[in-house]
Image (cartoon, helix red, strand yellow):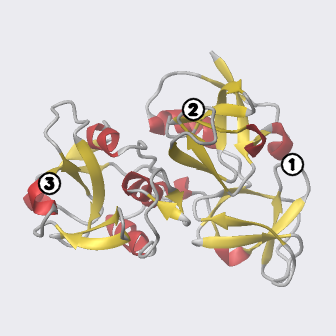
Amino acid sequence: MDRPVGIICRNVVSMRCRPDALSESVSQALWGERVALMADSRGFALIETPDGYRGWVIADAVCPALSLTGRSSTRLRDTGAEPAAHASGLWGTDEQERVIGELLAPLRTQPRSDARPITLLTIGARVTMAAGSDDDGYAPIALPGGGIGFVETSAIREPPSARIASREELAHEAFRFMGIPYLWGGRSTFGMDCSGFVQMVYGLHGTILPRDAYLQAAWTGAEPVERNGLSPGDLVFFGGDDPRGRGITHVGMALDPPDFIHAAGGTGVTISSLEDLPYSAIYRCAVRPRLTA
């Protein structure tokens, strides 16, 4: 079935389990992400993000894809593919697309630091370059609803699929998030949960992981790794003994063993040791995602 495609036009929008502003937030969608539109109800839209995750968002947080790209390709065939394959249909191959690489980047009305901010973009947000050259260190950005905004050029990266990162680069990227607060369902600079954190780190380098920890542990795009063979960038998992994998409730990223970095409830992004409690008691497995470009 073909699904219409929209573009997120708020800096961060909560994805909820039901079309109700008081229902649980299960994830977030970020500015500029292309999403498949699955249904609508009571002022909410059911969207599917490039990782295959679904949730309800406020309907006016999604703009028609055509309003930004100017292209007629605004429908996505629902193939049931795994996240990496599915994502290619949503990320697209627009040569003008870039990604925000700084933790926070003001989007302004004019190319100067004292201009009125339109919104505050978070790392991982997608932007489409508008016609024109950089102006005093600012790049022109096409706004989803029409018009132009400006972001500091230094805050913008080439698309993450441009090259394959090394595992050392992944670990270095993870350090940049130290101190980001923990937020259930979060995947932005304003707050992250454990799986949203590792998903963001890998996503910035072109590999799209599934959204939840138990899905990441079972993902076919990763290979199992023994605990004594851990390397920086490997994902380490913790939790119960459910044989279906759903007992896994937490994930982090290995650094130099036994250290790992993770988004911990009550603490935020921090570094812990696999040899310390409670992690030594609840460690379950590790995987090494295959890096893609």
Residue 279 in the figure: left or right of residue 264: left
* Residue type at the position of mark 3: Tyr
Pair 3/1: label in front: 3
Of marks 2 and 3, which one's residue comes earlier in the chain? 2
Q: Amino acid at mark 2?
A: Arg
**Who's the residue at 43% across and 31% down the image?**
82
Count of all numbered marks drawn on residues in the image? 3
Q: Which mark is residue 283?
A: 3
Q: Position of residue 132 (x, y in %)?
A: 88, 66
> x%, y% of residue 156?
66, 69
The residue positioned 38% from the left and 52% from the top of the image is 195
In the image shown, does 43 or 217 lie closer to the viewer? 43
Q: Disc 3 versus disc 1: distance between alpha carbons?
A: 47 Å
Position of 116 relative to 125 (above/below): below
State which tag comes first along the sequence, 1 or 2: 2
Report the residue at 15% width, 70% height from top: 258
Residue 40 percent coordinates (x, y): 70, 26
Point out the residue furthest to the top here.
1
The quarter holding residue 151 reads bottom right
Observer able to see residue 92: no
Query: Is 144 left, or right, of 42 in this rendering?
Result: right
Amino acid type indicated by mark 1 = Gly
Mark 3 or mark 1, which has the lower sequence index? Answer: 1
* Nearer to me, 288 or 109: 109
Q: Is residue 31 above or below residue 37?
A: below
Q: Which residue is mark 1?
A: 145
Asked if residue 265 can be seen in this view, the reply is yes
Determine the CA span between mark 1 and mark 2.
26 Å
Which residue is the site of mark 2? 18
Q: Nearer the viewer, residue 162 or 177?
A: 177
Residue 284 percent across, percent down from the top left:
14, 49
Spatial separation of the CA atoms under disc 2 and disc 3 = 32 Å
